[in-house]
C-alpha cells in the first residue's frame, strides 16, 4: 500500500506582500500549509505590506516567528517532525540551513524578484533600478546551498518604465505572482526538475543600506535619477546635503542626458541640478524648508566624498 500523502504538505517561509501572494497561491493550488514561518515587523521599519502572520492565523494555520533555521535548533526539529513535502520561501530574510533544504520530498523552492540568473542575492528590485534595467521579472527556483542559484521552474518578465520607482515595480511584479506561482506549483507537484541556471552570465548583489542612498553628483543625470527611484519612499530615499542639513530626494526627472552644463551639484534655476553630465530636476524632496521651489540658485551641493569624509 502506498504511503504517499493525498495532499502535499507545505511549510511556507515568507514575509511581506510576496509572502502573502505565495500563501494565497499555495492554498488555491490545493496544497496543505502545515506551518507558516515569518518575521516580526520591525518598529522602525515602514511596514506598508500585509501581514502574513495575520493571514495564517485567520486561516487557523500555526505561525512561527523569527526562528533559527540555520542550525539544528529546536525550531529545525519541529520542521523535521512535520516532514513537509515542499518547503517554499517567498521574501524570507534569514538563512535556511542545508539540513532543511534537502528535507522535503518535492524539494525546497524560492520566489525571487528578478530574471535569474541576473540579480541574485539581496535587494534585487532596488539594484535593478539603480542599474537602469528595462526588464524585470519573477523567478521560482530550487533552493540549493548557493543563493538563488538553483534550477528554474517558472519565470515571467515585465517592462520597466524609465521613471518607475521601487514601490511601483514591486506591484508590477506582484501582478505576475499568481501566474508564475501557479505554473511553478504545477511543475513542483509533478516532480519536474526545472532548467539549470547559467551562473556565468548572471550577477550577484548584496544588501543595501541607507548610506547607499547618498547622491554622488559626479554621476550622470540618468544614474542619479535611477538611484532616486530605486530608494524612493517607502524606502529611505536618496540623500544629499543642503546648508549642512540632510535633504531627502524622492522624485526627479532627467531634463538633459549629456554634456557638462556647470560644476556637478550646482543648483540651477527651478530646482534643476547640474550633474557630471546632464541636468536633473528635483520634483519632490523632504524634510526641508526647501521642499518645493526654493533651492538656493548657484549653490553647489557637496560631493559624496565631502558628505562621507
Image: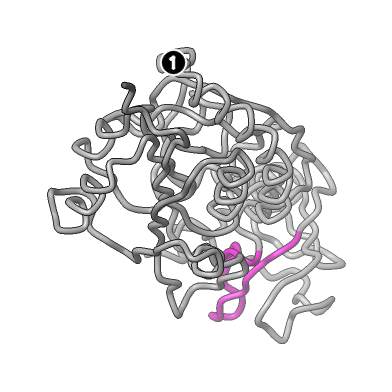
> Does 39 sit left or right of 169 as displayed?
left
Q: Residue at x 61, y 65 (%)?
A: 49
Q: Quadrant of the C terminus?
A: bottom left
Residue located beneath label 1 in the image: 193
Residue 100, above or below 252: above
| Predominant secondary structure, magenta span | strand
Q: Which residue is drawn at 39% across and 23% down?
A: 150
Q: Residue furthest bottom?
A: 289
Q: State the residue in front, 181 or 29.
A: 29
Is residue 242 a member of the stretch shown in magenta? yes
Number of disc labels: 1
**Neighbourhood count class around disc 1 (C-alpha, 10 Å): few under 14, some 14–19, many 20 upward:** some
x, y percent for residue 35: 39, 55
Q: In which quarter of the image is the N terminus?
A: top left
Residue 179, above or below 190: below
x, y percent for residue 153: 53, 22
Residue 68, above or below 195: below
Name which quarter of the figure residue 296 lies in: bottom right
Name which quarter of the figure residue 250 lies in: bottom right
Q: Residue at x 46, y 61 (%)?
A: 61
Q: State the residue in front, 281 or 134.
A: 134
Q: Which segment is the magenta one?
A: 233-251
Q: Which residue lies furthest to the front in this view?
A: 1
Q: Which residue is drawn at 53% across and 53% down?
A: 19
Is residue 130 a member of the stretch shown in magenta? no
Q: How is the image coloured?
A: one colour
Q: State the residue in front, 190 or 3.
A: 3
x, y percent for residue 97: 22, 42
> Does 79 sit left or right of 106 as displayed?
left
Residue 31, above or below 271: above
Amino acid at each position: 500500500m502506498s504511503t504517499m500523502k493525498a495532499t502535499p504538505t507545505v511549510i511556507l517561509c515568507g514575509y511581506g506582500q510576496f509572502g502573502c501572494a505565495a500563501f494565497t497561491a499555495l492554498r488555491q493550488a490545493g496544497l496543505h500549509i502545515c506551518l507558516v514561518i515569518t518575521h516580526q515587523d520591525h518598529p522602525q521599519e515602514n511596514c506598508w505590506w500585509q501581514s502574513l502572520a495575520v493571514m495564517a492565523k485567520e486561516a487557523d494555520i500555526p505561525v512561527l516567528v523569527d526562528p533559527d533555521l540555520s542550525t539544528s535548533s529546536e525550531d529545525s526539529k519541529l520542521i523535521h517532525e512535520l516532514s513537509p513535502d515542499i518547503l517554499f520561501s517567498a521574501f524570507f530574510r534569514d538563512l535556511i540551513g542545508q539540513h532543511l533544504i534537502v528535507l522535503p520530498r518535492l524539494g525546497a523552492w524560492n520566489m525571487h524578484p528578478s530574471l535569474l540568473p541576473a540579480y541574485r542575492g539581496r535587494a534585487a528590485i532596488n539594484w535593478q533600478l539603480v542599474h537602469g534595467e528595462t526588464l524585470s521579472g519573477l523567478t521560482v527556483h530550487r533552493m540549493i546551498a548557493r543563493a538563488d542559484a538553483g534550477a528554474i521552474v517558472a519565470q515571467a518578465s515585465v517592462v520597466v518604465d524609465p521613471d518607475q520607482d521601487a514601490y511601483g515595480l514591486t506591484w508590477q511584479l506582484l501582478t505576475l505572482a499568481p501566474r508564475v506561482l501557479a505554473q511553478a506549483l504545477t511543475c513542483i507537484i509533478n516532480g519536474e526538475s526545472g532548467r539549470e541556471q547559467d551562473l556565468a552570465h548572471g550577477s550577484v548583489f548584496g544588501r543595501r543600506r541607507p548610506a547607499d542612498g547618498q547622491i554622488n553628483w559626479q554621476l550622470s543625470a540618468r544614474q542619479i535619477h535611477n538611484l532616486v527611484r530605486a530608494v524612493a519612499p517607502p524606502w529611505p530615499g536618496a540623500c544629499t546635503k543642503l546648508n549642512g542639513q540632510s535633504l531627502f530626494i524622492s522624485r526627479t526627472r532627467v531634463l538633459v542626458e549629456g554634456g557638462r552644463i556647470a560644476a556637478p551639484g550646482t543648483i540651477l534655476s527651478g530646482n534643476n541640478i547640474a550633474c557630471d553630465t546632464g541636468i536633473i530636476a528635483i520634483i519632490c524632496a523632504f524634510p526641508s524648508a526647501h521642499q518645493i521651489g526654493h533651492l538656493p540658485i548657484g549653490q553647489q551641493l557637496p560631493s559624496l566624498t565631502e558628505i562621507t569624509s
